[in-house]
Image (tube, grey):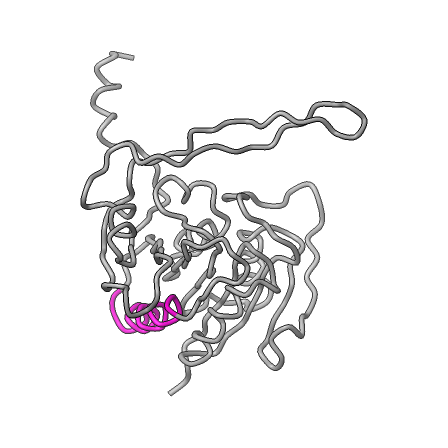
Amino acid sequence: MSKPLILVTNDDGITAPGLKALVEVATKIGKVVVIAPDSPQSGMGHAITVNNPIRIDESEVFGEIESYTCSGTPVDCVKVGIFHILKRKPDLIISGINHGSNAASNVIYSGTMSAAVEGSMESIPSIGFSLDDFSHKADFKPTQNFAEKLIEKALNNHFPSNVCLNVNVPKLPLEELKGMKVCRQANAFWEDRFDERLDPLGKKYYWLTGEFKDQEQADDTDMAALKNGFVSIVPVQFDMTAHHAISQINKWKL
């Protein structure tokens, strides 16, 4: 029986430790092809390259595993992977392991999750993995443990159509993680601020900063799961229609 074909990508770049950790897990389960950005692409969201050429180069980062660098975004990586490199849809797309949480509204900005969303748009089972730790020396072993379990479940069960999974792991040792919890996206947002600074020529420039705040403090969200030591799993869809608002807008008698 042939192994499932797994496309692996990320937004932190081909040399990111999180990508290496995810590839290690995927190779235990299936035939792996890696297509990742040639430089960090965090915060790119669902951007695609339209005004510049996309360059694809073979990479030796993962030894004998078929690997490529892409000059574009994480979504570009998925598109190029499906339609040019593989010339077929893989059995699974996995993205990550991202440095830092992609819970709540972070999913909108995340290149890691946008790669997974792109996969779901092509009706491919897709999962984005993130670890709530920004350190370059982050310990990915606990995330690997849960990623392996979830990848096997995704391949051996019916995967919801046009849906991807947003998986976030707390920064905790494996023995302190309580398990996985399927939940909803929290109503949490960045309260943006811009730090004004001066360059050596005395000209102003700005650095985006801010504080991430949970607006509802509910018990059934991804933020609550992470806070309580659970791996959060949020099913994500690309249909952004506010269905509940349709009847309200129709009352405007347009």
Residue extending furthest top? 253
Residue lying at 28% horizontally and 40% vertically, measured from the top left: 186
> What x and y, as percent, mark residue 242?
29, 31
User: Residue 177 versus residue 58: which sits nearer the camera?
Assistant: 177
The magenta segment: 142-158
In the depicted structure, whether residue 29 falls above or below residue 13: below
Residue 222 as seen in the image, left or right of residue 1: left
**Dividing the picture into quarters, in which one does residue 44 lie?**
top right
Q: Which residue is found at the position 71% from the left and 26% from the top? A: 198
- Assess whether residue 33 is covered by the magenta stretch: no
Nearest the viewer among 175 and 132 is: 175
> Looking at the magenta stretch, what is its main secondary structure?
helix
Label tally: 0
254 sits to left or right of 32? left
Q: Which of 82 and 173 is in front in this view?
A: 173
Question: Measured from the top left, where is residue 205 in percent x and y?
Answer: 68, 27
- Residue placed at 63% from the left, 45% from the top? 49
Instruction: Point out residue 236 in the picture as x, y percentages from the top left corner.
Output: 33, 49
Q: Is residue 131 above or below residue 245?
A: below
Image quarter in which the N terminus is found:
bottom left
Q: Which residue lies furthest to the left in this view?
A: 219
For the point 35% across and 70% down, which residue is it?
Answer: 151
Question: Residue 143 in magenta?
Answer: yes
**Of the pair 112 and 138, the residue shown nearer to us:** 138
Q: Which residue lies furthest to the bottom in this view?
A: 1
Quarter placement of the C terminus: top left
> Where 168 falls versus 174 (above or below)?
above
